[in-house]
Amino acid sequence: MLMNTVENNAKNIAVFVSGGGTNLQALIDAQERGEIKNGRIVFVLASNDKAYAIERARKAGIEYQVVSRKAYAASEEYDAAILSALENRGIDLIVLAGFLSILGPTVIEKYRNKIINIHPSLIPLFCGDGFYGKKVHTAVLASGMKVTGATAHFVNEITDGGAIILQKAVPIEQGDNEDILQYRVMRQAEWEILPKAVSLFCEDRIRIVGNRTEIIGTSF
């Protein structure tokens, strides 16, 4: 009976995807292990119909919809289409898991402090416009740095500029290329901190103070 009560009160999560959906899979796996407390993935939105993430959603029995960016000439029209797709779904949290389209101010304002993104670097390094996917890892390797990582953060109007929730560092090893480093960052950082950040949100354990966050409680 208690379990049913928790499930009924759980926050509804929508995951936005554009590609392979490895971070979506990490969230699905974490949910199946019971690691996303008081939250459940109820909807997946894909920005293109070729995204393998759609197949991941289908296998997990999660409802999905394609809202193609290419189908809309203006960003305002795309925002309206996204809001229409979310309408009447009772979405409490949006998670950008490799979502390559930029959300406009209409969506951001409606879901203010309710959108979490995962970025493959230690923000504020190697982030902002133009830094996504392997481009981030190419820049990191070119810099000569010995450590990189990933950041889970809230989304605001500035690209990768929202309040940071969690970060994890990952070593850069001699002989790394973009593919090797990308996989290590995903495996050692992204797939770990994104489900944790989502769970913290769903448990109401994140307090936003200005452009910083405070985690309520010490165990996570």
Image (cartoon, rainbow, N blue to C red):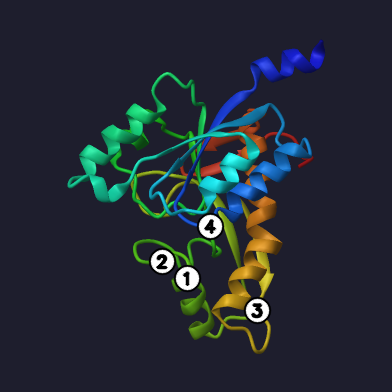
- Give residue 72's position: percent from left, percent from top: 22, 44
Q: Which callout, 4 or 1, points at the residue further toward the start of the chain?
A: 4
Q: Which residue is mark 3?
A: 172
Q: CA distance from mark 4 to mark 2?
A: 18 Å
Q: Which residue is at the far left?
A: 73
Residues at badges 4 and 2 in contact (C-beta under 8 Å)? no
Q: CA distance from mark 4 to mark 3?
A: 24 Å
User: Which residue is at a point 47% across and 22% down the rendered structure image?
Assistant: 89
User: Which residue is at a point 52% across and 74% down the rendered structure image?
Assistant: 137
Q: Depth check: give the residue in front, 107 or 14.
A: 14
Q: Secondary structure at mark 4?
A: loop
Disc 4 versus disc 1: nearer the observer: 4
Q: Which mark is residue 131?
A: 2
Question: Mark 3 packing: few (<14 Cα in 10 Å), some, or many (20+)?
Answer: many
Q: Secondary structure at mark 1?
A: helix
The quadrant of the rendering that contains the C terminus is top right
Q: Which callout, 4 or 2, points at the residue further toward the start of the chain?
A: 4
Q: Which mark is residue 20?
A: 4
Mark 2 residue type: Phe
Q: CA distance from mark 1 to mark 2?
A: 5 Å
